Amino acid sequence: SNKRAYNFNAGPSALPLEVLEKAQQELVNFQESGMSIMEMSHRSATFEKVHNEAIFRLRKLFAIPNDYEILFLQGGASLQFTMIPMNFLKNGKTASYIMTGVWSEKAYKEAKLFGEPVQIASTKENQYRNIPTFDEIDVDTDDAYVHVTSNNTIYGTQWTEFPNTGEVPLIADMSSDIMSKPVDISKFDMIYAGAQKNLGPSGVTVVIARKDFLAKANSEIPTILKYSTHAESNSLYNTPPTFGIYMLGEVLKWIEEKGGLTAIAQQNEEKAKLIYDVIDNSNGFYTGHASKESRSLMNITFRVADEELEQQFLSEAKEAGFIGLNGHRSVGGCRASAYNSVPLETCKALSDFMIAFKTKHQ
Ligand code: PMP
C-alpha cells in the first residue's frame, strides 16, 4: 500500500512521493531503452543526458555562477573532510575551523593529518547550542581556507549569515541544509554536501567550487582524490553512482516544479514554525536545545521536561506513526528533521501530536 510514514529521519531522509513514483514507473524500462537506468553504461548517451541535466538544473536552481565547477563525487561528506585538507593544506600551513558541532570536529580532525588547522571559534562549552557571533571570529590572512558547517544536524543550529573572510577562501559543509533556501554562492570558494538529506538518496556528494580555487590544489596526491581529476572529466572519471545521480536530477525537477528555492525556503520556514511554536508555547513542557537566534529550520531539537515522560513521548509518537524522532545517539532528547521533501502536513501532524501529548500529560 502507499501509506507513507510521518518521516522525520535525519538522513537518509524522506524523498518526494512524486519522485519515488516516477522512479518506480521508469524502473524496468527507462525511456524505452529496454533496461533500467542502473543497467546502462555511464558512457551511454542516455545516461550522459541525465547526468548533464542534473548538473544544469543544479546550476540554475542554486544560481551557481559559471566560474564554479559542479562535481558529483562519492565517499559522502566525510570524504570531503579529508579531500579538502589533502588538496589545499600543506605541511605547516594553517586553516581556520569554526567549531559548531560533531561534524566540524570530524572535519578538523582530518585536517590535522595534512597541516595546522586552528579552531578560531567554538561553541562547544555551550553544548553547541549556538552559532558564534562574527566578533568572535578572527581570520588569519595566511590561512589556506576557513571551514564552517552551515547546519548542525545533531544540535539543530544553523548559520543564517556567513562571516566575511576577505581574501581567505570560505568552505562550507552544507550537508544538512543545501538548497533549503537561496544562498549567495559567490561568498564561498567551496560548498559540499552529501545528497541524502535535501537532494536525493545517499551515494552522491555534491561539490560546488570556484575554478580558480581548485587550481590552487596540491598536485602530489592520489588521482582519484584530486578535484581536478573529476573537474576535467565532468565527474565521469570513473563509474559514478548512476542511480543516485538520476534520483538527484528528479528531486531537482521536483524543486523546480515547487517554484524553486524561494518557494522551498518559505515552506521550510512554515514547517519549522509549526513545531517551534508548540515548544515555545508549552510553558516549559518542551524545551528547545538550540538558542533561539541560532535555531535550524532543518533539524528541530528539543527535550520533554521530564526524562520518563520523554521516553513515553518517543514511544507514543512511534505508535502514532512518527519515525526518526529520537535525538542523535550522542545527545539524546528528540529531533525532528524537516528537510525539503518532508511535507507540511507531516509537520502539522507532529505539532498536533505534541499539543495533544502535552494536554494529556502535563
Ligand atoms: N556533515 C554534516 C553536517 C552531516 O550532517 C553529516 C551526516 N549526517 C556529515 C557531514 C557526514 O556525511 P556522510 O555520511 O555523507 O559522510
Image (cartoon, rainbow, N blue to C red):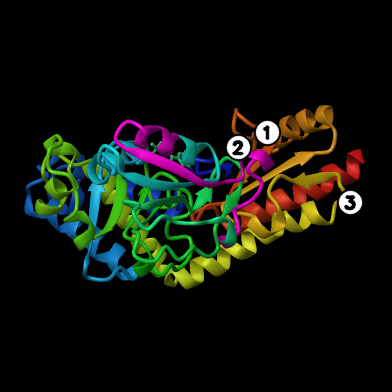
Provide residue 167's location: percent of width, then percent of height.
Answer: 34, 65
Provide residue 293's location: percent of width, then percent of height.
Answer: 68, 60
**Residue at figure coordinates x 61%, y 64% from the top left:** 269
Provide residue 306's location: percent of width, then percent of height.
Answer: 85, 33
- Is disc 2 placed on a helix, strand or loop? strand
Q: Within 10 Å of the Cα at label 1, are there few (<14), some (14-19), or many (20+) other Cα atoms?
A: some
- Res. 297 in view: yes
User: What residue is disc 3 on?
Assistant: 283
Between the residue at mark 2 and the residue at mark 1, the CA separation in whole angstroms equals 6 Å
In magenta stretch: residue 29: no
Between the residue at mark 2 and the residue at mark 3, the CA separation in whole angstroms equals 26 Å
Q: Is residue 14 left or right of residue 79?
A: right
Earlier-in-chain disc, 2 versus 1? 1
Of the pair 301 and 355, the residue shown nearer to us: 301
User: What residue is disc 1 on?
Assistant: 318
**Residue at figure coordinates x 30%, y 70% from the top left:** 60
In magenta stretch: residue 116: yes
The three-letter code of the residue at mark 1 reads: Lys
Of the pair 99 and 274, the residue shown nearer to us: 99
> What segment is highlighted magenta in the picture?
106-134
The answer to whether marks 1 and 3 mark residues whose Cβ atoms lie closer than 8 Å is no
User: What residue is disc 2 on?
Assistant: 323
The three-letter code of the residue at mark 3 reads: Asn
Between the residue at mark 1 and the residue at mark 3, the CA separation in whole angstroms equals 24 Å
The three-letter code of the residue at mark 2 reads: Ile
**Residue at figure coordinates x 48%, y 65% from the top left:** 181
